[in-house]
Image (cartoon, coloured by chain):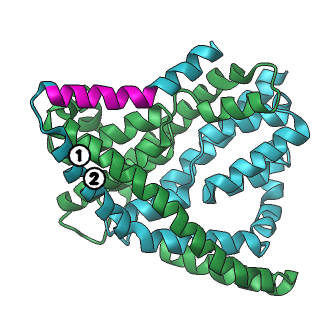
């Protein structure tokens, strides 16, 4: 799937550039994008390592287990295939909590670790398990309590009431997450 | 209210550090050693995802630079109009699926052109929070799990994001009337 999307994007880009005359810009874009990827990944490297280091402390001290205990009923219902106390459950909880508080930088590391643990449970198959797909779908519905970045942008551009969108945004994000859960639960039953 | 919200988000990160380290010390964990061990795991994860990440940033970059994104947006214009979505929002919704930084740029431009308190501004503010950069998230996460067949992930994510967009359009119209 992603395979075809990726190839399609590159081919479409070259074809479009041929028509719009952006070809020379396209050539330099290949190089500058690869440089951009390196600079983003270096930032990510620092943030991820910092976070996983911190999480290891939480893990070794038993704090992580304590925190995820509260999430257990939710996890059990969403991911019946994950055994209780498995690291996958802890990483998923940490990812959900970070997303909920709008800490995007803190959501990615546990999300990646969750996928690795789920891959262990899935015996490293090349086909995604139900738990992986459902986790991804719910994760990408991006449930967020307070859209802090958006409030900041709004006030920066002179909004009379920057935080007036908090409640409506909450309704919209809850709605999209509910739809995500229903869709995932339905598709997990019927998708081959 | 606003002050409290920003204060809380400022405090969040330092509090997480203080909380975890203090708890670790109380439980007599060698916190620095645990930190090293965990950080090394994180470094491995990031190295593993780099090829995927590179492929994606390049694809998104050339897709935008070639003008293909604008062409695609133009094709979707009638769909947006059918659900009463103002036309400047359509490229934002499209771009958000692919790239977060590019869509943020468009949002700020819209705030400049229409103002954050206009119908367009309010709708965008609501919409951004319930949509996700699906392409980026899926590629990176699945490459961490070394999965190729992603089954119902993409359709599921698109359905929930479209639901978020639909809800934003309705709520914003309702708020401004």
Residue beneath disc 2: B39
Q: In this view, does A137 lie above or below B66?
A: above
Query: Looking at the picture, how far across and down is residue A82, in whole percent?
Result: 20, 47
User: What crowding class fits label 2: few (fewer than 14 Cα within 10 Å), some (14-19), or many (20 or more)?
Assistant: many
Q: Give the range drawn in magenta.
A: B12-25
Question: Residue B19 in magenta?
Answer: yes
Task: Specify the farthest residue to the top.
Answer: B1
Q: Which chain carries label 2?
A: B
* SS at mark 2 in the image: helix
Query: Looking at the picture, how far across and down is residue B122, in whole percent?
Result: 77, 31
Q: Is residue B83 above or below residue A171?
A: below
Identify which residue is drawn at 50% across, 20% down: B8
Identify which residue is drawn at 24% across, 70% down: A125
Identify which residue is drawn at 86% across, 33% down: B115
Q: For the C terminus of chain A, give its image quadrant.
A: bottom left
Report which colour depicts chain B: cyan
* SS at mark 1 in the image: helix
Residue beneath disc 1: B35
Q: Quadrant of residue A182?
A: top left
- Can residue A186 be seen here? The reply is no
């Amino acid at each position: 799937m992603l395979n075809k999307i990726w190839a399609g994007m590159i081919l479409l880009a070259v074809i479009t550039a041929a028509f719009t005359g952006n070809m020379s810009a396209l050539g330099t874009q290949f190089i500058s994008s690869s440089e951009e990827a390196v600079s983003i990944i270096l930032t990510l490297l620092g943030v991820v390592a910092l976070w996983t280091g911190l999480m290891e402390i939480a893990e070794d001290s038993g704090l992580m287990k304590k925190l995820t205990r509260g999430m257990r009923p939710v996890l059990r219902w969403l991911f019946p295939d994950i055994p209780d106390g498995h690291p996958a459950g802890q990483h998923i909880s940490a990812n959900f909590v970070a997303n909920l508080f709008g800490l995007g930088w803190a959501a990615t590391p546990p999300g990646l670790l969750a996928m690795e643990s789920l891959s262990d449970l899935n015996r490293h198959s090349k086909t995604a398990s139900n738990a992986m797909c459902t986790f991804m779908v719910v994760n990408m519905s991006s449930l967020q309590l307070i859209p802090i970045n958006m409030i900041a942008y709004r006030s920066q551009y002179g909004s009379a009431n920057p935080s007036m969108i908090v409640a409506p945004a909450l309704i919209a994000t809850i709605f999209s997450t509910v739809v995500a859960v229903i869709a995932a639960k339905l598709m997990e039953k019927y998708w081959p | 209210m606003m002050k409290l919200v920003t204060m809380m988000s400022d405090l969040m990160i330092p509090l997480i550090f203080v909380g975890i380290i203090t708890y670790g010390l109380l439980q007599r964990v060698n916190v620095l050693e645990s930190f090293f061990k965990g950080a090394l795991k994180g470094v491995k994860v990031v190295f593993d995802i780099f090829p995927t990440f590179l492929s994606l940033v390049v694809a998104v970059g050339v897709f935008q630079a070639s003008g293909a994104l604008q062409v695609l947006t133009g094709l979707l214009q009638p769909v947006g109009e059918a659900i009463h979505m103002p036309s400047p929002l359509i490229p934002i919704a499209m771009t958000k699926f692919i790239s977060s930084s590019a869509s943020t740029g468009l949002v700020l431009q819209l705030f400049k052109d229409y103002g954050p308190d206009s119908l367009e501004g309010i709708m965008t503010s609501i919409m951004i929070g319930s949509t996700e950069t699906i392409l980026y998230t899926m590629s990176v996460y699945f490459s961490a799990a070394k999965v190729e067949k992603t089954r119902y992930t993409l359709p599921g994510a698109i359905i929930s994001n479209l639901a978020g967009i639909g809800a934003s359009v309705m709520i914003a119209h309702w708020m401004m009337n």
